[in-house]
Amino acid sequence: MKNRIQLSFAVFVFLFALVAAKAFYIQVVNKDRLIAYARSQFLREVKEYPNRGNILDRHGTPLAINVQIFNIFTFPRDKGPAFRRQLQALSKIVPQLSHNQLWAKVRNRRKYTWLGRKIRLTEAQVEKIKKLDSIQLEAHSDRVYPNHELSAQVLGFVGVDNGGLAGVERFMDEALRGMPQIVRYQRDAKGRPVRFESGGDTVAPADDVTLAIDKELQGTLEDALKEAVVHHKALRGGAGVMDAETGEILAVANYPSFDPNRANEYGADARKLAFLTDPFEPGSIFKTLTVVSALENKVATAQKKYFCEYGQLRVGNHVISEAESDKKFEWLSVTDILKYSSNVGTTKIAFDLGYPRLQATLEKFQFGVKTGVELSGESKGILNKHKKVKPLTLSNISFGHGVATTAMQMMRAYAVIANGGYLVKPTLLRNDVSQLTPQNRIISAETARASATMLIEAVEDGTGTNAKIPHYVIAGKTGTAQRVAERGGYEGYISSFAGFPVNVKRPFVVVVYVDNPKANGYYGNATAAPVFRKITQHLLYKSKDFAPYARYSAEANAKNLDTVHMASAASRAVVPGRMPNFAGLDKASAVKLAESLNLRIELRGFGVVASQRPGAGEPLAGVQALELRFRPPSYEE
């Protein structure tokens, strides 16, 4: 009897252990899978995000906005005649959804099924669809880019679920999307869907993102860049403008570009911002860094002279030649070496300097390091990390070969010279805080001033004459580098220009490059410098800050500046009932005069009033609006 009791006890203990183990497996180990399976039988959860945040330019102008669209779905559990009739009714309400397409989607489905996504509907269509018991609607917002190609590579685009896939849309996706609310769709005993919202879930609103981009400047940059690429039959081009104090990117683009409203119709090359992602050998615009290093290390001065070997310098088994074979330079100062872009002269400066010191300078400028701008896919470029290099390698690096940089890195480097010696971090987000702090200084103010002076000479009387802007002092450098071919070796050229106006209140830098020009010249002065001039001229005129850097005396400036003295603005003759003459007024004075007459005005352009409609002297009676067109002031020698 005792043995029987012990055996029975052991059997019951074993069976209890099995039950406990099974319960542990179900309730602990396999809990999540079983809960999810159970929910799938009667509950469907969908994340509903708030309206995606807008993307704005620095002045609050929308660059990316939302419009309402709808997703249409169903639970095709009962696919009888009544259900088929509702599909037919839906196809009549929404013509782009044919009955055959709808039936193909639901024929083999018994679960939650999309019938159409991102469809724009009128209020009448929405009301008709709501009357169909088996068809459900979800209201969403659709991303729209009202300016189409403008700043497309910076903005990026979104996917079918409104999630960011590229550009700022991807990098700032979390802020732009906000926090979702969980919406549950539950079926009753007959399989009919019942929608309700979870009361415990809260929605965090999406944030708007304000970029440093100036829409008007961006448009000018893209137009000038496109014109150059087309004119020179180039593969592509890129340009950027950066505030040298705050690091704000005021405009940046590559051409060809794309329309983010139809992003799937374009290839990856058009959608990426190559200005940031594609490194290239910068060529002669890199010579400035060799000169900066020599000045900073007290190896050379602007006046120090080098014998330039009549344009031919043998280094090992190779001969270093000038870009133009007819250049037979003898003795050139450092200023002249930069002015005339001498390869031989730059090589000799580099030999005096040595690679360790040149490398240290380049590392201070953070070549070989990403700038950290708010976009994915940035390249860090290529910089030789060895302390010792062969003379030929040092020669090549000194004039921008054997090293690869992005245009963004070059723009950051030239900003150091423009702002007096400070390395600033580029940013696409609006940020009016100056980065000119002691910890950001990497070269002395003296070196920066001396380098800028030499760059002025390069524009005034050197290789960059096409970058001149009348009455302004421009510092800059051209570059014409051999282009690395896809299959190795070199094929064609990359032409570039990097520069800035001097003595401005808010220094800014412009970098332009044209990739593989095949017509109408290929040197940087012929291809990139004119683009620089158009972009810089737009920004200078728009700022209206002429006095500090215009090349005129105070008396001449008083006659030419894009301003109107208060005395002359206030003395405009106003005849009762007649339109006054607005010609020559600046915007502030024109607006003040129009407001005094209770006129609604439309402003076009910038500068001073060039024309008006209705014209001066015409009757005021019945005038709905006054259109004023502005243009930059003209200067006479």
Image (cartoon, rainbow, N blue to C red):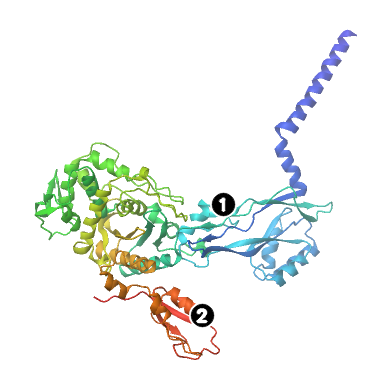
Secondary structure under tag 1 reads helix
Q: Position of residue 109 (x, y in %)?
A: 71, 54
Residue 526 percent location from the top left of the image: 25, 66
In front: 221, or 156? 221
- Horizontal and vertical percent position of residue 40: 74, 47
Residue 40 in sight in this render: yes
Residue located at (84% from left, 51% from top): 189
Q: Is residue 185 left or right of residue 285?
A: right
Q: Quadrant of the N terminus?
A: top right
Residue named by callout 2: 596
Q: Of the residues shown, which amino acid type is indicated by label 1?
A: Ala
Left or right, 158 with respect to 230, comes to right
Please, is residue 2 above or below residue 451 in the view? above
Q: Earlier in the sequence, mark 1 or mark 2?
A: 1
Q: 467 left or right of 69? A: left
Q: Residue 175 — which label? A: 1
Q: Residues within 10 Å of mark 2 (few under 14, many from 20)?
A: few
Report whether residue 88 is seen.
no
Q: Are marks 1 and 2 in contact (CB under 8 Å)?
A: no
The x and y percentages for residue 333 are: 14, 53
The amino acid sitting under disc 2 is: Ser
User: Badge 1, how many Cα within 10 Å: few under 14, some, many 20+?
Assistant: some
Q: Nearer the viewer, residue 593 or 219?
A: 593
| Residue 537 occupies quadrant | bottom left
**How many numbered badges does the structure rendering display?**
2
Residue placed most toward the observer, 484 or 253: 253
Residue at 20%, 60% in the rendered image? 457
Secondary structure state at the residue bearing disc 2: helix
